[in-house]
Image (cartoon, rainbow, N blue to C red):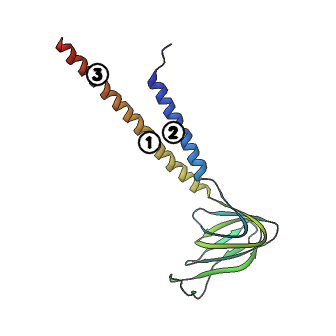
Amino acid sequence: MKINKDKILFWSWTLLVLVIYIIIIAISTKAKEYNGTNINLTVNSMNDILSLNSDSNSTIQAASSDFFLMRNQNGDIVYGIPRIKPLGWDKKYYFLAGPITISDGKWIIEQGSFALNLTNIKKMNLLVIQKNWIIALKMIAIFIVTLLVWVFVIATYNSAKEKSEINKRLEDESENERI
């Protein structure tokens, strides 16, 4: 049984690209996890759902240059209220929420982007989860890029192989002409 080198290379390359694609998807769509008694981060309505777990209620304070709103599954709402800008604030508007006490659970960022500070006397666990449509868009974009790389390498290999075969035929022909 003759082993076809080209088939082995093709399937090895295909498997490698597929494994890399799966790893990139797993890394880029993974929820970000924060732990501690004081958590600071920036969230936005384009892709963030917050899942907060702690043994006691947490205190939230948030600020932004635009209106923002987040809601949990119990119907609780946290939103920014226009305030006088603090010294050094270079944006036109200043919206502030809190400090107020919030409960655990899933919080959906419905509008805006804002800096968030969560505090608790006990350790908190916060997962920042991307919304499904953002994950789908990332998967499609990564798939397209991966497919293009896969096709490019296959085309480059085939082109190099054809050039090699042409050069070999020309060398054979020139050698036959010498004889």
- Closer to the camera in the image, 84 or 125: 125
Which residue is at a point 48% across and 43% down the rendered structure image? 146
Choose top left, top right, bottom left or bottom right for residue 176. top left
Q: How far apart are marks 1 and 3 (CA)?
A: 28 Å
**Mark 3 residue crowding within 10 angstroms, few (<14) / some (14–19) / many (20+):** few
> In this rendering, is residue 146 above or below 97?
above
> In this rendering, is residue 32 above or below 25?
below
- Closer to the camera in the image, 139 or 110: 139
Q: How far apart are marks 2 and 1 (CA)?
A: 9 Å
Question: Which mark sits nearer the N-terminus, 2 or 3?
Answer: 2
Amino acid carrying mark 2 in the image: Val
Amino acid carrying mark 3 in the image: Lys
Choose top left, top right, bottom left or bottom right for residue 77. bottom right
Name the element at disc 2: helix
Name the element at disc 1: helix
**Lateral position of residue 47 relative to residue 118, left or right:** left
Question: Which mark sits nearer the N-terminus, 1 or 3?
Answer: 1
The circle on residue 149 is 1
